[in-house]
Amino acid sequence: MTKVLAISGSLRSDSFNAKLVRCAVDQFGDGVEVEILQGLKHVPPYDEDDDRDGAPESVRTLRAAFAGADAVFISTPEYNSSVPGHLKNALDWVSRPLATNPLRNKPAAVVGASTGAFGAVWAQAELRKVLAAIGARVVDGEVAVGHAAARFDEDGTLMDEDLCEQLGEVVDALVSAVAERHELARAAA
């Protein structure tokens, strides 16, 4: 069974990015278990001093969630034309130590939603750059849900068929990347 860790980069429980994550969860097929990350707002600011003698409990939980997943799916909002600080901070914690962090060579996908016209495209680009620097294998594909307030119905369903299709393509690319990684690992064993 493939395990995917899904993350909304927004802290608001009913955010557009949380809705986009739930729409993506519905597109993962049989054989894929999706865990939606909880507790992002409880992760303290990164401080190497706090990481020397054992990280705080919230960070240990965060790192374990990343380590236990075969892939990561992130939906990010855009704050001031970039990645939300709390999401970047969480990735900073997960990235330590760099050579053995739980994102190293792990497939990751990035999508986003925003109330603006461009659907968090700048934040998505920044997040892809950060993930690649950490060592993740970022899959191709983009879903930019602009004017997000008009894109979801009252049940949180994404109403735009083209965007739903794009989301499905990103989900498929992520699952394919996991299968390829597992196949390479079997061939190397």
Image: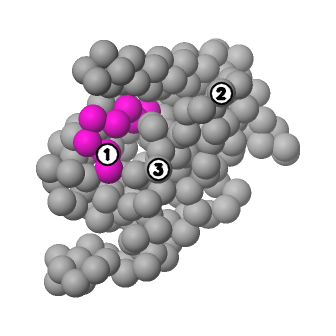
41 is within the stretch colored magenta: no
Q: Name the disc covering residue 68, or none.
A: 3
- Which numbered disc flags the more N-terminal residue, 3 or 2? 2
Main SS of residues in magenta: loop
In the rendered structure, the answer to whether residue 44 lies left or right of residue 144 reads left
Q: Secondary structure at mark 1?
A: loop
Q: Position of residue 37 (x, y in %)?
A: 56, 56
Q: Name the disc covering residue 31, or none.
A: 2
In this orientation, does residue 122 appear? no
Range drawn in magenta: 102-109
Q: Position of residue 115 (x, y in %)?
A: 57, 45
Q: Would you say the residues marked 1 and 2 are in contact, meaning their CB atoms lie under 8 Å apart?
A: no
Name the residue: 30% across, 31% down.
137
Task: Name the residue that disc number 1 marks.
Answer: 103
Q: How many marks?
A: 3
Residue type at the position of mark 2: Gly
